Amino acid sequence: MKQLIQNLKQFLPADVQVTAEEDLLRLMTAQGEPCGIVDIDEKGDLIGFDLQVAPQGKEGSDAHVIAQQFAAAFYPEAAEVIQENYSSQSTVIRLAETDSIHHLPIPSAGLTVEVHDSGFVTAAQLYRNTYTLKDSKELLDAAEAKQKLLAETPVVIAVEDENPVYKLSDQAIGVHADGTVLFTELPPVLTDIEEAAEQQDWASLMGITESYVNYYNEDGVQLWAENTHVENHPIDEITDQVAIRKNEDVLFYSGATPWHKDKRYTEEELKRQAVRFLSAVTEQPLGEWKHAGEQLAPDAAIEDELEPAYIFLFAYTKSDISVVGIEASIHVGIYSGLIRECIVDRVPDAVKDTGGHMLSYEQVKQQLGDLLQLELAWVPLQEENQYELVYVRKDN
């Protein structure tokens, strides 16, 4: 404890005192006022502290040097500076432990030090976590890893600063030592849509008949209900059976027209209904949409007044390249075949205005490959505090 106090005082202003009260250390001003608490573990090692007064002193100190000196005093294994953020009158520096073979930072082990412009340390937090490193006896080289990533990662179009840009999908994080690509989740397999031979309008696909009335239509909102229901209730008490909301970002359809549990449609029949509806409401050619998957709605097993539904997902593409964040999700009732919900993202003007200026998929892959850089890093496994060696994408 005595040695810890001596080590700590060299990084604090001279008028800040460190006092011990049993197993607790307090920071006190020269006037005897509390100005912070020092946390220590059961072994008497420093966990962290926070000085709650602004120190006075001459500016111009090297925050890096002070942070590394602090680490040498309290956590000598954490010597690698991996992050630095400057804020008003102070610099926050993150240092990490590194492994003995590759000398790479270990994410869970290290410390954060806040160095005031006066040269004093005003806060610190130490992370002495135990960890397991899963190294590999055979490690493919960076060039081979890059080719693996390029081969298996889809190209996408993203809108950044109102401009469309080509990117590799963010779902691909990097490449394992054995050459398999590491994904946050597997990208959907996109397939062409087979347009239904029989076209229908959106209203009939939602169950709207001649007995329904559009009793509200303002500010991009339409509400529909059966005429008898509208005639017998004040407008603020009408339960809308179909609602449509449109704005610059999204088209939203919601339906709760009557249904009966007479039969169950096949998945293929439901998919055709979803395609018909997408064809009726989309503002783009249907061929620019791709089927991206389907699933039974999570609440489909709950038998209540809402009809169980199957959800069909569609991705918008330009020149067969998926556009990030532009999707359609269509819920189709499994007993009625009616559309129960539909959300369609509007395509940004930046993407619509590309016209014929699109590169081919092969050209895009070539350009992205020229820019792609990988670096080795320790990446967390699902098991807590376990890490494996992965070639990860380096920010350009």
Image (spheres, rainbow, N blue to C red):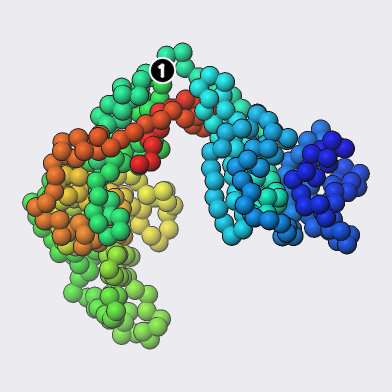
Going by the image, does 342 lie left or right of 76?
left
Task: Report x, y in % for residue 345.
Answer: 27, 59
Q: Is residue 15 above or below residue 179?
A: below
> How busy is the neighbourhood of tag 1: few (under 14 within 10 Å), some, or many (20 plus)?
some
Q: Nearer the viewer, residue 9 or 243?
A: 9
Task: Report x, y in % for residue 306.
Answer: 38, 60
- Residue that appears at 39% across and 37% down: 394
Residue furthest to the top: 137
Q: Nearer the viewer, residue 296 or 76?
A: 76
- Residue that appears at 53% across and 42% down: 83
Q: Is residue 188 visible?
A: no
- Residue that appears at 56% across and 24% down: 99
Q: Is residue 76 visible?
A: yes
Q: Is residue 73 above or below residue 250?
A: above
Quadrant for the C terminus in the image: top left
Q: Quadrant of residue 143?
A: top left
Q: Nearer the viewer, residue 34 or 242?
A: 34
Going by the image, does 278 lie left or right of 41?
left
Q: Mark 1 is on which residue type?
A: Leu
Task: Report x, y in % for residue 215.
Answer: 28, 81
Quadrant for the N terminus in the image: top right
Q: Is label 1 in a helix, a strand or a loop? A: loop
- Residue that appears at 68% across and 37% down: 69
Name the residue that disc number 1 marks.
139
Q: Quadrant of residue 2?
A: top right
